[in-house]
Amino acid sequence: MNKYKVVLLSGDGIGPEISEVSKKILKKVSRKYSFEIEINEQLFGGIAYEKKGFPAPEETLDQCKESDAVLLACVGDIKYDSLPRELRPESGLLKLRSALNLFANIRPVKIRKSLIGSSTLKKEVVENVDLVVVRELIGGIYFGNPRGHITNTKVPKAFNTMVYDASEIERITHIAIKIANQRNKKICSVDKSNVLEVSQLWRETVSNITSKDKNLSLSNMYVDNAAMQLVRDPSQFDVILTSNLFGDILSDLAAMLTGSIGMLPSASLNNIGPGVFEPVHGSAPDIAGKNIANPIAMLLSASMMLKIGLNEAEAAENIENAIDRVLSRGFRTADLNNGSCQILSCSEIGEKISNEI
């Protein structure tokens, strides 16, 4: 029997609620497919700051490094916004990504047929959407130096640095190539090379690497046009390859093509070692504790973890099929309410999905 060590970071806001659903289903699916998951819960985010003084305690990071995979719910709350930057929950995310060298963020965006009506866009615009955003995760403006504030001037200033070297661009490009070759062999590289030197290096490096694979089709697009095209004709995209800042924005935009950001998973990966699997959505502190959150993105993240991180593809497919069966019968959480479905709580829809495993 295969045995896996999974670190669960429930985090803040709705995190504990959606984590509870995922724990139950992971335990059930592991019994069905004869493998063992040891779930090790650790403090992370705002709750870790409150109890340990840091959003990413060293003990948590050490446990993550020793695991087979990390399943993360969500972090953050407006009450932490007044803290110094390095103590905010979001800084814990950056520290986790850096500690595990998670340079690639993978966000699949696919319309589930039963939820086409939930999208704010017309059916004919979104019905064939099936794309993946490949985002560089530990470089660019979020990590660049120098950065800071200048306050000893008449007019206060602040500055950040967007920087990439060719090796960082090369390794994320290889990830995009691998994914594209498993799909439709199309990559759209998104940059702002008409005004940014760093984007000029990005475009040049991506073009050089992809040109070695004659089966691939590469297109380039400015980020502002990419945002427009994602709304106008999203089905034209297969794999979108882009930098940290642009990927952060475009992946959230792409997420809403499905009608709810509560439906999409993501994976943050490196070349070797544990990856982090997490829903795209935030911590939604306004609905925390009300048992109305949508746990499906967390469940789909758990499915990605099983498939990519633990090589348990059958179990992963079982979870996804169970979700589709429940949705096809008209069961929804409140964020997906279209006026003609049965609204369930977070725990209730989790139970419905569990019954399908």
Image: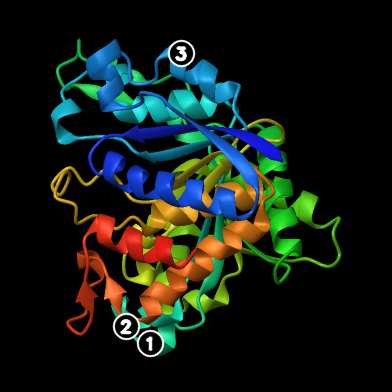
Residue displayed at 48% across by 39% down: 71
Residue displayed at 27% across by 18% down: 49
Residue 92 seen in this snapshot: yes
Question: Alpha carbon of mark 3 to alpha carbon of mark 2: how far?
Answer: 45 Å
- Going by the numbered disc 1, the residue's amino acid type is Lys
- Could you say which quadrant of the image residue 8 lies in? top left
Image height of 266 relative to 1, above or below: below
- Going by the numbered disc 3, the residue's amino acid type is Glu
215 with respect to 113 (left or right): right
Element under disc 2 = helix
Q: Position of residue 95 (x, y in %)?
A: 45, 23
Element under disc 3 = helix
Q: Sequence order check: which comes first, mark 1 or mark 2?
A: 2
List the residue tagged with mark 3. Answer: 59
The nearer-to-camera label among 3 and 2 is 3
Residue 254 seen in this snapshot: no
List the residue tagged with mark 2. Answer: 117
- Going by the numbered disc 2, the residue's amino acid type is Gly
Quarter the N terminus occupies: top right
Q: Sequence order check: which comes first, mark 3 or mark 2?
A: 3
Task: Compare residues 293 and 78 and report the one nearer the observer.
Answer: 293
The nearer-to-camera label among 1 and 2 is 2
Q: Position of residue 128 (x, y in %)?
A: 51, 82
Tag of residue 356:
none
Task: Compare residues 300 and 354 and report the one nearer the observer.
Answer: 354
List the residue tagged with mark 1. Answer: 123
5 with respect to 286 (left or right): right
88 with respect to 142 (left or right): left
